[in-house]
Amino acid sequence: FFVIPNTGKQESRELTEKIVAWLSKYQYEVFVTEEIGQLYQLEQYARSKEEAYNRADCAIVLGGDGTILSTAREVGLFQCPLLGVNIGNLGFLAEVGAKDILLTLADLVNGKFTIEDRMMLQTKIVENGQTNNIGLALNDIVATRASISRMVGYSVYVNNDLVNHYYADGIIVSTPTGSTAYNLSAGGPILAPSNEMIVITPICPHSLTARSIVISSNDQVKISFEFNRASWDKDLQVTIDGQQVVNINNESEVIIEKSPISTHLIKMGHDDFYSLLRKKLGNS
């Protein structure tokens, strides 16, 4: 087991020590990063990230959704299943609470869980004739202006067919997992995470008719930019899962498609998606 705490959370050290002690007591191999080993005085369990991901059957991620998102992108080719333990705020991706951790560990080692595959997106930037891969997203990829105020013109294509020109603050391209995040705040639809679809949602479009579009996960999305008005902003950026920011120039194209890599989330069976939706975003 690879234990990955968010050191910015107050409870993370105590919870990490509790998990490591319980697993060690029952003779399970436990790993932490070299940084955590030094910080929490757990040096005997310290390994490089590559070794830990390669050897672990499961990564236990302590934090909120942000911690799980960053870990999901990091796991990449290792394809290590993730169990999220919520010590954050909203906790859509974190499967269990910290107070239930020992019961959860007992169920985990006894095989009382399922694994849910979540599709990811991969992003390429075509700039000055060169194509650069800039990373994976579990939630969303957002193209926006880099500075405040002025409007940007976006042209969105699906499989090289023009969908629409948008005059807007940005464009969100989301997975079903990310549909309850920025996409939802921007008025986009909620998709059950078991679906394999892509949602394209304009942010604050200057239009009465611009709406979200749901497309197949096999489709490719391309975003280019228009600057035929002097007032439009020419400083642009692409943000991956709200965490990784890449600055691009006004002649760039953003290519987004389904990644062959997916995130494997461990589900303990406590809540189905719809009850989780009511609990986190509803009134019950």
Image (tube, rainbow, N blue to C red):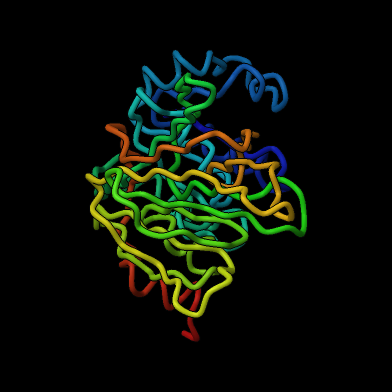
Tell which of 101 and 168 is nearer to you. Answer: 168
Tell which of 183 and 273 is nearer to you. Answer: 183
Up/down of 133 relative to 223, above or below: above
Picture coordinates of residue 24, whole percent (x, y):
46, 28
- 64 with respect to 22 (left or right): right
Tell which of 247 and 253 is nearer to you. Answer: 253
Up/down of 60 relative to 155, above or below: above
- Residue at position x 47%, y 28% in the image: 126
**Considering the image in quadrants, where does the N terminus appear?**
top left
- Residue at position x 54%, y 34% in the image: 252
Picture coordinates of residue 16, whole percent (x, y):
59, 37
- 245 with respect to 240 (left or right): right
Up/down of 100 relative to 137, above or below: below
Report the number of numbered marks.
0
Classify residue 90 by image quadrant: bottom right
Residue furthest to the bottom: 283
- 190 with respect to 15 (left or right): left
Picture coordinates of residue 275, whole percent (x, y):
36, 74
Classify residue 218 by image quadrant: top left
Picture coordinates of residue 257, whole percent (x, y):
33, 40
- 32 with respect to 161 (left or right): right
- Residue at position x 54%, y 58% in the image: 99
- Residue at position x 41%, y 37% in the image: 255
Residue furthest to the right: 148
